[in-house]
Image (cartoon, helix red, strand yellow):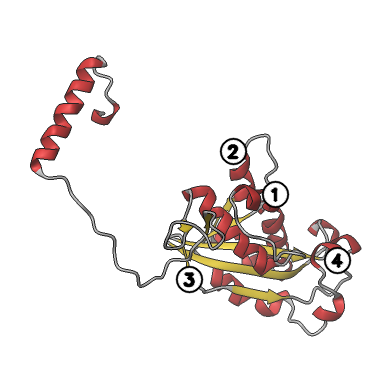
Amino acid sequence: MRQIVLDTETTGIEPSQGHRIIEIGAVELVDRKLTGNHYHQYIQPDREIDEGALQVHGITQEFLADKPRFADVAEDFIDYIRGAELIIHNAPFDVGFINHELNMLGSQWGKVDDICGVLDTLALARKIHPGQKNNLDALCKRYDVNNSHRELHGALLDSEILADVYLMMTGGQVSLLLSDDGSGDDGQQSSGIKRLSADRPALKVQYANDDELKMHNERLEAIAKASGGQCVWKQ
């Protein structure tokens, strides 16, 4: 399973008002493991950046002056995301901007939904944590994901943080970082994300023997009898 955790920064909030993408950042997950195959690109938007947007990401027009335009990077970007599932926080925003950029290049480019699937982690978080704050900072605090290095929004940094949040939100605790005595350096238990090596040995699978299977089936029969045939493990 190939997933791309993606974020964008833009000149403003409405593509219908001519706002453009100025940064795309993405990291790749294969079978829920970060591969190191990331995508990062700054883009010249050929328009002014709203003051409100500038305060969010800090990317200036002067910085973008020598950067390529979306048309120059579109093919490489589409090749990178093609066939994957995009994981995006507040997906309608980013997908809307990407579709706007593709539409400006011509209908032959299609839309994001023609290229890959999309999972909105904001919608997912609202289902898991209804009635609570579910922005990225709130989720980092809830799942103990370190985002202390995030002073301004940045597409690649935010996609890396979102990848950690997504893994915690959909799979529980990924790892426990402990010293030899079962505590952190300060004597307190500390938890966090630990990236697993791709060349680690396969986990050993222990199968039940015949006697254990017999005892298991006998137990299920007893549960089924006591529950009037409502043993879910036999359905």
For marks 4 and 2 on the same chain, the one whose residue lies earlier in the sequence: 4
The image position of residue 204, as x and y in percent, is 24, 59
Q: Amino acid at mark 2?
A: Lys
Q: Label for residue 35?
A: 3
* Residue furthest out toward the bottom: 66
For marks 3 and 2 on the same chain, the one whose residue lies earlier in the sequence: 3
Residue drawn where x is 54% and y is 63% of the image: 185
Q: Is residue 231 left or right of residue 174?
A: left
Q: CA distance from mark 3 to mark 4?
A: 31 Å
Instruction: Name the residue tied to disc 2.
Output: 127
Circle count: 4
Give the SS element for disc 2: helix
Name the one closer to the observer, 186 or 101: 186
Instruction: Name the residue tied to disc 4.
Output: 54
- Which numbered disc, 4 or 1, marks the residue closer to the eye? 1
Q: Amino acid at mark 1?
A: Asn
Instruction: Name the residue tied to disc 1.
Output: 135
Name the one closer to the observer, 209 or 120: 209
Label 2 environment density (alpha carbons within 10 Å; few <14, some 14–19, many ≥20):
few
- Which numbered disc, 1 or 2, marks the residue closer to the eye? 1
* Residue furthest out toward the left: 210
Give the SS element for disc 4: helix
Q: CA distance from mark 1 to mark 2?
A: 13 Å
67 in relation to 45, above or below: below
Q: Is residue 10 left or right of residue 215?
A: right
Q: Amino acid at mark 4?
A: Leu
The image position of residue 58, as x and y in percent, is 82, 69
